[in-house]
Image (cartoon, rainbow, N blue to C red):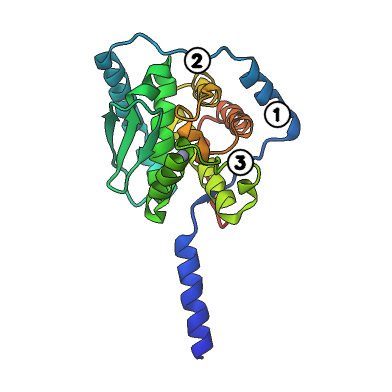
Amino acid sequence: MRRGAVAAALFLLVSQCGAVTYDRAEPGTAEIGAARADIRNAPQPAKSDRSFDELVAMADRAAQRLRGGMRPLCAAVDAETCNFSLRIASNEIVNAFVDKEGNVWLTLSLLQYLETEDEVAAIIAHELAHLLNGDTRLNMTAQKQRQAMRYELGGSSPASAASRQSGIARHMISIEANADHLAGFLLHRAGYSLETAERLWIVLEKMGDRKAAAILATHPFSGERLAAWRILADMLEADPELMPRRIAE
Ligand SMILES: [Zn+2]
């Protein structure tokens, strides 16, 4: 009897630690290869000469449009919260994250590298998806920030081949893939183009220096990410009413 109670308590603890998982189509080798080639052949991203006010206005518009389309998705994924605020940090590091209070943070440096509102909406949608998936409750944000800091300071990338073998790294990459998945739906519902927005993943990959690419340290390899994004774009084009489907991990 006692043992049963302990087992039940442990199960509860484990299930509370689990992240949301979606029924996703995994990209194949050919699709990943094509995505990698496209990333390789894309031009080196350059900073736009848009003013601070223009960048902030573009991000505000994207946030507003995402808010307009997110209600049915919040219900479909059983999200605890369906509200967020957008905050822009005037930071030289290219980064984006979401905190427990529902603030989506983008740095000005990241915005400077983005060309279209679709790309801006995609990064907001990705962070928003972490919030709706309940990832902020897992304390992943703080952990990611620490890892990103270590990466900037010259440590090895947590996304390196060796560290990807570890359970924690794999778990974090799965959390990121699930956030990308929900982000695609959020973007689609707000009327943005996933095809136009895919440049975001290319830009993040192409920014070579450690300081600029801090955001990449804890995220999936961009070839896999872009390939998965394209599969979802095709699925949404074939069935615009498609909704994300949660599954047990
Ligand atoms: Zn993320």
Indicate the amino acid at tag 2: Pro
Measuring 24% from the left and 15% from the top, which residue is drawn there?
Answer: 53
Residue toward you, 246 or 107 = 107
Residue neighbourhood size for the residue with mark 3, other residues' Cα within 10 Å, grouped as few (<14), some (14–19), many (≥20)? few
Residues under labels 3 and 2: Cα distance?
23 Å
Please tell me which of labels 3 and 2 falls first in the chain. Answer: 2
The residue where tag 1 is placed is 31
Instruction: State the residue lying farthest toward the front.
Output: 154
Q: Nearer the viewer, mark 3 or mark 1?
A: 3
Residue 160 vertical position relative to residue 207 in the rendered view, above or below: below
Please tell me which of labels 1 and 2 falls first in the chain. Answer: 1
Residue toward you, 73 or 7 = 7
Q: Nearer the viewer, mark 1 or mark 2?
A: 2
Residue toward you, 45 or 184 = 45
Instruction: State the residue lying farthest toward the top.
Output: 49
Q: Secondary structure at mark 3?
A: loop
Residue 174 vertical position relative to residue 199 in the rendered view, above or below: below
* Number of residue marks: 3
Residue 30 locus on image (x, y percent)? 75, 29
Q: Secondary structure at mark 2?
A: loop
Residue 38 vertical position relative to residue 184 in the rendered view, above or below: above
Q: Nearer the viewer, mark 3 or mark 2?
A: 3
In the image, which disc is placed on residue 45?
Answer: 2
